[in-house]
Amino acid sequence: MTTSQFGIIAIIAYLAAGAALVHSLNTDYIASKNSSWQRLRVLGLGWLAAVLHAASLTDMCDRAGTVNFSFLSVSSLASLIIVAILLLAALTKPVDKLGVVIFPLNAAIIFLKLAVPEEAHALKIHSWQMDLHILVSMLAYSFLNIAALQALLLALQDWHLRSHRAKGLIRSLPPLQTMEKLLFQLIAAGFVLLGLSLLSGFLFVENLFAQHLVHKTVLSIFAWLVFGVLLLGRSRQGWRGQTAIRWTLGGFISLMLGYFGSKMVLEWILNRH
């Protein structure tokens, strides 16, 4: 099978996983523990989609070892890492409901990669140190992406509980305190990984302006500081609720603009590698 065929089947599998998850939302959190087959079906479809997704990305690296880091290729790889983290975390944490957003989003990203023609952008520096830096960077982005989605879900859950309209997705979620604890665990993991990413990244930066990295670096450092202040506020002042949600989303928006916003502008608007 070709990578495009793997991609098409992955899209179908992601949409099937999302549909199965939506269908299971009529079961509340307590009952879902006793009907684990529904959860296993969703996770099974999710893993199938992730494996097919990975197969569709095998063309990112050619036989000579050159890696294509074009915008949509990197976006697809990042979305794959995000869903892999989600599925692994779902083995022990109640994060599977985030698949309502992540599964369809991954399907959309694969579709764009297949449908939109894009010039290959080869990775200029290729060494194990750079590979490690890229891996840590993408893990950091993935953890904080999931944290941002968790924050949105937490905000939705809080609003529904305050207005006494909890049903469907909201009724299927764990208690608010559990959701909030999970949010800060995700942020803490992402904060550490982002710090390591920034530290390792400086080893490969010769000239910020010549390498078009100044915006990415500044925005990433700002995001790291935002998450650091949030964790400190949680530890010292007990920050939670709307305060935690706003800081999480603010930090992630800065990180997303740094990681992908600048790359999209450089490649799609300025036509620079």
Image (tube, rainbow, N blue to C red):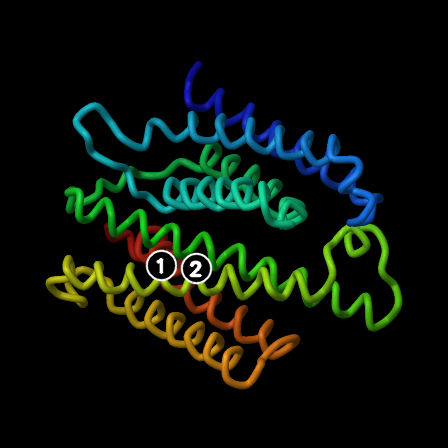
Rendering coords of residue 170 (x, y %): 78, 56
Residue 81 lies in quadrant: top left
Point out the residue furthest to the right here: 164
The image shows residue 177, relative to residue 118, as above or below, that is below
Task: From the viewer's perspective, tell me whether residue 263 is left or right of residue 142.
Answer: left
Rendering coords of residue 246 (x, y %): 58, 75
Rendering coords of residue 232 (x, y %): 46, 79
Q: Which mark is residue 189?
A: 2
Q: Are marks 2 and 1 in contact (CB under 8 Å)?
A: yes
The image shows residue 225, relative to residue 93, as above or below, that is below
Q: Which residue is drawn at 15% across and 43% down?
A: 127
Within 10 Å of disc 1 (Cα), the crowding (few <14, some 14-19, many 20+) is many
The image shows residue 119, relative to residue 177, as above or below, that is above
Residue 195 lies in quadrant: bottom left
Task: From the viewer's perspective, tell me whether residue 62 is left or right of residue 37.
Answer: left
> How many tags in the picture?
2
Quadrant occupied by the N terminus:
top left
Q: Residue at x 75, y 33 (%)?
A: 38
Cα distance in 3D space between marks 2 and 1: 6 Å
Q: Name the residue under label 1.
A: 193
Q: Which residue is drawn at 47% across and 74% down?
A: 231
Residue 197 lies in quadrant: bottom left
Q: Which of 83 and 12 is in front in this view?
A: 83
Q: Residue 46 carries which label?
A: none
Callout 2 secondary element: helix
Q: Which residue is drawn at 28% across and 67% down?
A: 217
Within 10 Å of disc 2 (Cα), the crowding (few <14, some 14-19, many 20+) is some
